[in-house]
Amino acid sequence: MTQSKTQRRPLLFTELDAAVAECHQLAESGYQQNGNWTLGQICRHLRLVQDPSIDGYPKWMSLFAPIRPFMRRLLLPRLLGSNSPQGIPTSSVFIPPNDLDDETELLSFTNSVRRFQNHAGDFKPHPGFGKLDRRLLEQVHAAHAAHHLGFLAPQT
């Protein structure tokens, strides 16, 4: 896997199963890394961001609550329309380490997706968008996955 800086592939997922399938295809075919993270790092990041939907986000993230209406009105449509903003720094708690195994992290991400899909209770408010129903929250996580996986191109 060589690294070069090129444009992100346009991907659009509306459900998490599509993200899992794309991850498996990338693991099978091999991939060209066109961004900062490997498949394993992306899978870890996606899991770290997704699991708090059930377990709860760090308390300090509630500081963003006053700007949620703005974020929901302006950023949510961009995210869901595959026009996700780039270059927004992520909190250090969501940044994956460098030495991750793709297969191990893919399995953990897949298990996280199944846990999300099988969750019967309420979901915690998203730090940027607030309380979302199951369908919309899955679309948010799927679109987030598409954004990051777009930086990996399948080997031909």
Image: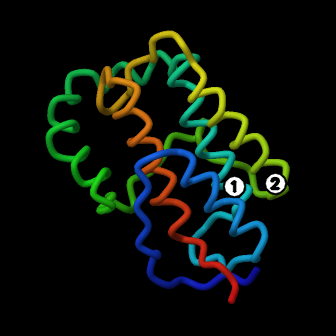
Direction top: furthest residue: 121
- Amino acid type, mark 2: Leu
According to the picture, the residue beneath numbered tag 1 turns out to be 41
Please tell me which of labels 2 and 1 falls first in the chain: 1
Secondary element at tag 2: loop
Q: Quadrant of the C terminus?
A: bottom right
* Image position, residue 67 (x, y; %): 20, 29
Using residue 110 as the reference point, say whether residue 8 is left or right of it.
left
- Amino acid type, mark 1: Gln
Between 150 and 119, the residue placed more toward the observer is 119
Residue 69 image-quadrant placement: top left
* Image position, residue 37 (x, y; %): 64, 63
According to the picture, the residue beneath numbered tag 2 turns out to be 100
Residue 27 image-quadrant placement: bottom right
Height in image: 121 above or below 94?
A: above
Using a 10 Å C-alpha cutoff, classify the residue at mark 2 as few (fewer than 14 neighbours), some (14 to 19) or many (20 or more).
Answer: some
Question: Going 61% across and 62% down the picture, which residue do you hit?
Answer: 22
Q: Quadrant of the N terminus?
A: bottom right
As drawn, the label of residue 55 is none
Q: Are circles 2 and 1 on residues that touch, CB within 8 Å? A: yes
Residue 130 image-quadrant placement: top left
Question: Going 67% across and 50% down the picture, which residue do you hit?
Answer: 43
Question: Going 65% across and 33% down the picture, which residue do you hit?
Answer: 114
Using residue 147 as the reference point, say whether residue 95 is left or right of it.
right
